[in-house]
């Protein structure tokens, strides 16, 4: 819903900045930030979220966001962050930035991430395979590889680890 409204509105007016959350109705803020960066490179995006995870910060920066602020920050800090981003600065929570650097990038391939994300709901492998247009054996292989890379003993644990780190 948000994404449709966004794309219906943009041709009418030029957007200078956007304040997005990671989870929004009709899509996610990281995807919307990437789409905005591709369509309107001068738009400055600030992610305002409760999800203070290193992987989300990294993905936000890769998607073109210029700021990443946690919702529990004081209102004055948020206002300052927005002003700084609109002035051309990057604004990141220092502790989260340090954690993102220490954490490193996700060890998962894009396909492993896709399959693990599809497995969030606990659906059987056959259902995952059908939805992803892969064979059941291929889905099992991707899940097994993701579990091994994350040091998980089950699909559910692998999903939890990847979500906790912001990789899903």
Image (tube, rainbow, N blue to C red):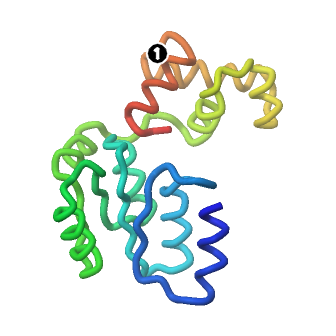
| Total number of numbered discs in the rendering | 1
Q: Residue at x 56, y 36 (%)?
A: 113
Relative to residue 18, is residue 128 drawn left or right? right
Residue at the (55%, 89%) spot, across then down: 13
Horizontally, residue 165 falls left or right of residue 9, namely left
SS type, badge 1: loop
Please provide percent x and percent y for residue 126.
80, 21
Q: Position of residue 105 (x, y in %)?
A: 37, 41
Q: Which residue corresponds to the image point at 39% horizontal and 69% vertical from the top-left?
A: 45
The answer to which of 144 and 69 lies nearer the viewer is 69
Which residue is outermost to the top?
Answer: 153
Q: Is residue 70 above or below residue 64?
A: above
Please determine whether, in this image, residue 63 is positioned above or below residue 168. Answer: below
Q: Residues within 10 Å of mark 1 (few under 14, many from 20)?
A: some
**Residue depicted at x 50% and y 34%:** 108
Residue at the farthest front position: 75
Asked whether, in this view, residue 56 is left or right of residue 108, the answer is: left
Residue 65 in picture, x, y percent from top left? 38, 65
Q: Position of residue 163 (x, y in %)?
A: 45, 32
The quadrant of the rendering that contains the N terminus is bottom right
Q: In the rendered image of this protein, does residue 123 appear above or below residue 37? A: above
Please state which of residues 35 and 51 is positioned toward the viewer in this rendering: 51
Residue under pointer 1: 152
**Which quarter of the figure has residue 151?**
top left
Q: Is residue 42 left or right of residue 127?
A: left
């Amino acid at each position: 819903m948000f994404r449709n409204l966004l794309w219906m509105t943009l041709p009418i007016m030029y957007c200078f900045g956007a304040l997005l959350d990671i989870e929004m109705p009709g899509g996610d803020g990281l995807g919307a930030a990437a789409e905005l960066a591709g369509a309107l490179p001068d738009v400055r995006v600030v992610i305002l979220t409760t999800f203070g995870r290193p992987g989300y910060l990294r993905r936000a920066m890769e998607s073109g966001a210029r700021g990443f602020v946690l919702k529990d920050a004081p209102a004055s800090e948020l206002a300052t962050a927005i002003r700084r981003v609109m002035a051309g600065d990057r604004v990141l929570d220092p502790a989260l930035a340090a954690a993102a650097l220490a954490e490193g990038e996700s060890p998962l391939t894009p396909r492993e991430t896709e399959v693990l994300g599809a497995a969030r709901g606990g659906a059987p492998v056959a259902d995952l395979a059908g939805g992803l247009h892969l064979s059941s054996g291929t889905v099992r292989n991707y899940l097994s590889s993701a579990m091994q890379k994350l040091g998980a003993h089950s699909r559910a644990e692998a999903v939890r680890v990847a979500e906790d780190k912001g990789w899903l």
